[in-house]
Image: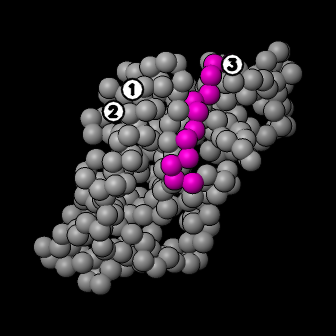
Amino acid sequence: MNEARLKQLIRTAVLVELAKRGLYYIPAAISARHIHLAQEHLEILFGTGARLTPKSELSQHGEFASEQTLEAAGPRGLFKAVRVLGPVRGATQVELSITDTYTLGIKPVVRMSGKIEGTPGCTLRGPAGTVDLPSGVIVAARHVHLSPEQAAVYGLKDGDAVSLKLPPPREGVLGGVVVRVAAGFDLEAHLDTDEANGSGLLCGTILEMASAASIMTAAAPFAGTAVDAALDLVTERDVNKALMSGAGAVYCSAKGFVSPAAADRAKEKGIAIKRLP
């Protein structure tokens, strides 16, 4: 066992013990742009019979960064040497930050991994060929990985959403962090480089799960009457606040604007967006 893995196991064991005492902390992992390949596309890009060659282990069991890299191109620009992660998957998926999508000239679509229907595509170029993806480019929704045992200790289940407190010097709360529970997962919050850079986070930064009181404070715009709560601009963040506070609706002023991301999130989570007359 390498030193990094040993440190991770010790850290996770300590955090789980703290959770048993009602202190809920989760380490952060920062995901840079990367690519997951289906076997079909792996062979087109790297040659018939190609297999991914592990370069380094990732924190989640069985996942690794491979030696292989690809060029990812969009209408406006391209990235060279984008790392391919393994093992191969059933469908090819490209994960970028929102800033990355602007560089490529691709509409940013925030999705959970694997939910690629209706997403934009891009062109992947490898040493043996090219693949024009019609879809599969996503901005990964922020999420938390837990094993079933860890989820039980934290009182969470797959599909839940939690809020995480950001430490100084840029304190804040990240809401709508989706919980993913599966055998082989290990305790970790996955954020992209935009979220990490904007908050001053590094890999391994320990984040605290926000308490119910903190969540209600963050949801203050939903207190009081509907008129008081009406927003001129409804964003995905506002929908997440409503979700975490238990509110069933977000109120928009008569001439207010609802962002497409907010509308998608509200539809996904069953939150009504009510426009006031």
Amino acid under disc 2: Ser
Q: Nearer the viewer, residue 141 or 22?
A: 22
CA–CA distance between discs 2 and 3?
26 Å
CA–CA distance between discs 2 and 1?
6 Å
- Looking at the rendered image, the quarter that the C terminus falls into is top right
Q: Residue furthest top?
A: 224
Q: Is residue 137 visible?
A: no
Amino acid under disc 3: Ala
Point out the stretch of residues depicted in magenta: 202-213
Residue that label 2 marks: 147
The percent coordinates of residue 124 (x first, y second) are: 38, 74
The circle drawn on residue 151 is: 1
Judged left or right of residue 26, residue 94 is left
Q: Image quadrant of residue 50? A: bottom left
Q: Residue furthest left?
A: 49
Residue at the spot 33% in from the left edge and 48% down from the top edge: 6
Name the N-terminal-most of marks 3 and 1. 1
Residue at the spot 67% in from the left edge and 24% down from the top edge: 215
Residue that label 3 marks: 213
